[in-house]
Structure formats: C-alpha cells, structure tokens
Image (cartoon, rainbow, N blue to C red):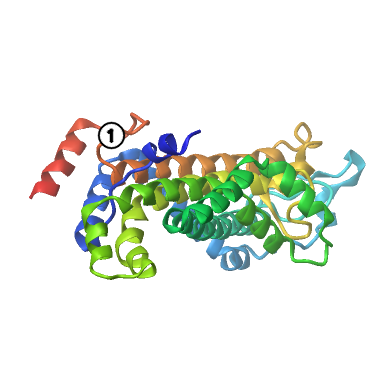
Amino acid sequence: MSEALVATEVPVASVPGASGARQFWRRLRAQRAAMVAASVVALLVLVALAAPLLTVLEGQDPTTYHPSLIDSARGGVPIGSFGGVSGDHWLGVEPQTGRDLFARLAYGARVSLGVALAATVIQIVVGVVMGVAAALGSGWVDQLLSRITDIFVAMPLMIMSLALLAIVPDSFPRTVLVTLVIGFIAWGNIAKIVRAQTLTLKGLDYVSAARLSGWNTWHIARRELLPGLAAPVITYAAILMPVNISVEAALSFLGVGVKPPTPSWGQMLTAADVWYQAAPQYLLLPASALFVTVLALTVLGDGVRTALDPRAASRLSVGTGRRREAKAAKEETA
C-alpha cells in the first residue's frame, strides 16, 4: 500500500484543546454501536484490574488444583453439570487440573489487555519518532529511515515473533518478552502514516511561518506538528489494540507466548482443543472472551475514527441513525 493511500485512510484533523475534545465526545456519543463497544471494553478493563478482588470474593485463585472436582475415571472431566459450576466455582473448573475457570479468565484478561496496550504504546512511540524523523530529516536520513521502515513493514509478524520467542530462555519474563517482540516488530505501518502526514503538515502556512520565525526543528515538531498528528495516531492506536490481542492469543496458542502457570486466553484455547466434546465450556469461554474483546475494540476503533474525522462515513451502519447524527451536528453548532 502506498504512503499516499495510507495517509488518506486516517483523519487529517487534529484534536485541539477542550473544544475539540467536546466535539469528539459529541460525535462519538451519536454512535450507539461505539458507545456499546466502549461499555464492553470498560467492563473488560474493570474485570482485568479487579481480578484479584473478584477471585477473593469467589474464594479461588487461578493456580490451585482441585483434584477432588475431577472424575479421573472419565479421563479428567469435571464433576457436575456445566463443567462443575457451583457457588464456589462460578464458571466451573478446568478439565484434568480442576483449576477455577473464572479466576483463570479474569487473570487472562489482564495478560491479553496488558500485553496489547503496552505493545501498542511501544509501536506508537517508535512509529511516531521514526516517521517524524524521516519527514524532517535530510534526504539521506529520510531514505535510510524509510528503507528501515520498509524492512519492518515487510517482516511477517507471526514468523518473526515465533523465531524470537523460541530462542529466548524461559527465565526471561514471558509477558514482558511477548510485549517487546510485538511492539518492536510491528511499528512500520504507523511510521509510514506519520511520515506521510508530517510531509503534508510541513507545507502548511503556519508551519512555514514558524520556520521563518527562527524556531528549530525540534520546537516546530513539538509545538506545530505533533498536535496535527494526534488524530491519525489515536485512530491507528485504536485499530492496533484488537490486532495485538489476537497476536498475543495466537502466540500463546502456538505455545511460544505466555507460559503456564500464568493464565492466558490463547493458552487456555491450546489446552482446550482436546476437550471440546467432553467439556465444551472450557473451549467456549476463552474463545468467547477473545471474540467479544476483539469485536468491541474493532467497533470502538471505527467509532473513534469517525468521530475524529466527521467527513468519513462509518463503515458500520448500526447505531448511526440520522436523528442522532443530526442532534450531534446541532450541538456542535450551538
């Protein structure tokens, strides 16, 4: 995809001050689907942050084995209906081990959301630095940084991640390692977007005026260019979150991501592939959690993109009724 095409897929407007923030919030509120997705994401974040408290209320933890709750004569299937659901185990227990499923799902949310958020921050920081430096640098600097960016864009993320995670000793904290690998490999696209947008902003009158006033490059970048990059960067960050969650889950599913006993949704799916008939809830619960999380973040990302760039129509027709859009437009002009 060319840089010009990439640049047109993100909003070019910035979000200046409190006025811009209010307009953004009004546009976002006009989209029911985005607000529902935001509520789901907020609930998931709350569950992740409150996982220790929730498991204490349940009276369980994610690592304790309960062999008495497993029917060894049937190969380790949980005893009781719906996988051993009870007042002590709200979502049942894990086959063979008897570990509490609710506790593992709650702590797994911390891993999935934490890795995705941290990796996204790394990608954004590296991408913005590389993109701005390439756009503002001399010809050879631009060429060098652009070629480095092209190399990282062309790298197959999953293959490179599998290779790097396979050779690093298990003594290195796996959650941190997965975060660093994802973050420092998949920053190329945001760098290309930022470079293209910065080249556009460089030609605007207010940037030229700042340059004629004697401001140095760093001052111009910090005061004039970075605010103009806020909208595309925020939009792309919202898009990256569900992608990074999927990558973390895939790496854990393949056995090179987060290692036991640390719970992870992808890791739970790996262990559940032989239990989908005897204990289907063990497969359905982490799969549903992943599906809902990725879907909610994707819908929210689309809503953020549309709210930052009102000229672009939302790709989702759900929740963008004409009355609510007209009301939001009227509030903006009021």
At a point 9% along the width and 47% down the height, the residue shown is: 333
* Residue at the disc numbered 1: 320
Quadrant in which residue 119 is drawn: bottom right
Q: Residue furthest top?
A: 317
In the rendered picture of this protein, how many numbered marks are placed on residues? 1
At a point 81% along the width and 59% down the height, the residue shown is: 168
Where residue 250 appears, x then y in whole percent?
69, 43
Where residue 29 appears, x then y in whole percent?
27, 46
Q: Closest to the observer: 20 or 327? A: 20
Q: Secondary structure at mark 1?
A: loop
Q: Closest to the observer: 84 or 247? A: 247
* 235 left or right, relative to 162: left
Q: Alpha-carbon neighbours of circle 1 within 10 Å: few (<14), some, or many (≥20)?
A: some
Give above or below for 320 relative to 141. above
Where residue 156 appears, x then y in whole percent?
68, 40
At a point 15% along the width and 37% down the height, the residue shown is: 326
